[in-house]
Amino acid sequence: MSEQQQNTASTDAETAATAETDAEIEAAAADEQTSEKLVELAKRRGYFFQSSGAYGGVGGFYTFGPQGAALKGNVEDAWRDRFAVAEGNMEIDAPTIMPEPVFEASGHLDGFDDMLVECPECSESHRADHVVEDNTEYEDAESLPIPEVEEVIAEYELVCPSCGAGLAGQAVETFNLMFATNIGPGDSQPGYLRPETAQGIFVEFPRLKEYARNQLPFGVTQIGRAYRNEISPRRSIIRTREFTQAELEYFVDPEEDEPDLEAVADVEVTLYPASEQNADDGAEIETTIGEAVDKGIIGDEWVAYFLGVAKPWYDAVGVDMDRFRFRQHLSGERAHYAADCWDAESEIDGNWIEMAGFAYRSDYDLSKHAEYSEDRFTVFRQYDEPKTVERATVDPDMSYLGPEFGGDAQAVVSELESLAGRDRDAFESDSIEIELEGEHHEIPVEKTGFAVEEQTEAGEHIVPHVVEPSFGVDRLVYTVLHHAYAEDEVDGEERTYLALDPEVAPTFVGVFPLQNDDELEATADEIVANLRDVGLSVTYDDSGNIGRRYRRQDEVGTPFCVTVDYETLENEETTVTVRERDTTDQTRLPVSELPEIMADLRAGELEFDEL
């Protein structure tokens, strides 16, 4: 290639890159405008709005209005159908407040923190990682250590988002996100609002395993509220202080249980593994679940299985698959309990937001609760045939330990039992050393009653491992609305509509009498009753001209509208006009067949263009 050709090729490449960048910027700007319009629509049409508005509102708390509550409920029902009913899992409903020891055991008291930086001028607190991500090229500042975040703030001379004062030199500190409370009056028991619904499942494991007949694997689901005292809640219902989670804790025997990967092997997915995120030229990978497991891109088969289950479900409830991916957590951003985790992410305003996490929690949670509580968090694994094994045991001489250690004698026994189980060689010398409350003590081996015995065992107690798909319902609702938002022109007029999937749309059908006429209204009332009898959500509207009524229903996402007109009364066969939201196409259908047809449309067993 000549120098001139090289220069031309270089210029073309730069022009193409610039054009692509400009296109991305324009797309992100358009997306942001969509978000602004969506928030306005949500407030006006009753999807969601900031709570306590009469008192000025409070950050991080939102009320779902009539449309939003219905949409949210439909999403939750769809999740329950797929992850509880279809998978054969149990569902519970645990309290939202739990005593402090639960969170000591779970690690949330020590490890559930975000990075906080306080403005020296206005004293506003901000999430330091968000300040970095919003103003630099860093995409996952949450995974950076605090000293590095402080260096980035200084290097880029980042400023307070509220007043513009410089933040360089300000200390970045950890802030625990849990809401504290007291249980009972007087010298009450300290407690916390749960930061995740999962702990309500884990603490009840000793009883739940009985309901599962002590047979692994089994799953327990829960849909409920969780609370996190976010430093800087933002972006409406994407980051709030009170939110709804839909979680599945799936308990497995790590040595024997395997998922049915064949059922999801052909599911096509977009993956963004940690290796690609860390590479200079890293990119998303288009593959299938089966290939991702075979190539080691997804390390755990159970996590892969649930990714394969989740992808088509997200598609079914209305997430745009062109703006959807699974991203693996970097090592620095994984929760304290997670051995590995993948997020389901959707693209909003040019940014990727987390909608769900698929974590392999190993035996962390059950082992911790076993350590801190007085209950057994194990399942008995039956051997195919009884085994003869050697067990190290101790039978301490309490007449020696009692006078020697007093009230700590039982703690010494526990230490001896633990030592015998993990290091029997320690008992080969004349004495052994144990540590008790930071002090070291020597005990003659002859006083420990140490022995190695042969025992015949029918099985063993194991601590199950946990695989957790955890879905954020509020963020999913926002994503579904954002991806459904559309604008077009109908009969020369601009139209805004929500192309919601019929399965989750708050209202399935609107019924209108064409005019205020007793006969038309009576027929419309009868149609409403018949449609509700088959379980459909129906709204009745007789206000304004028919065009305005269509626009109102389009804007809230109602898939179909039924109009009762004078042809309904005049024709020998009673028919009505049925209009489809997205195309605005219309057809006439017999009133007698309307409930069955609309129910089939709702169930996805019939398409409108087939009528």
Image: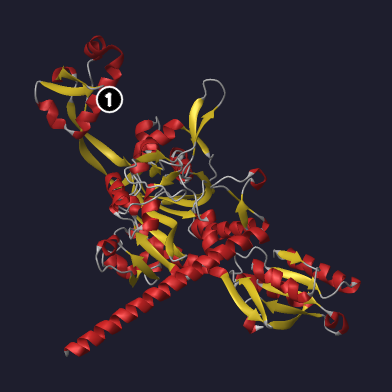
- Image coords of residue 588 (percent x, y): 75, 83
* Res. 544 image quadrant: bottom right
- Image coords of residue 110 (percent x, y): 36, 36
- Visible residue check, residue 578: yes
- Tell me the kind of residue under disc 1: Ser
Pointer 1: what residue?
414
Is residue 380 positioned above or below 304 on the image? above
* Res. 542 image quadrant: bottom right
Residue furthest right in the image:
518
Is residue 448 positioned above or below 484 on the image? above
Q: How many marks?
A: 1
Q: Nearer the viewer, residue 439 or 202?
A: 439
- Whether residue 147 sits left or right of residue 66 in the image: it is left
- Whether residue 330 sits left or right of residue 556 in the image: it is left
- Image coords of residue 532 (percent x, y): 74, 64
Mark 1 neighbour density, 10 Å: few (under 14) some (14–19) many (20 or more) = few
Q: Nearer the viewer, residue 80 or 382?
A: 80
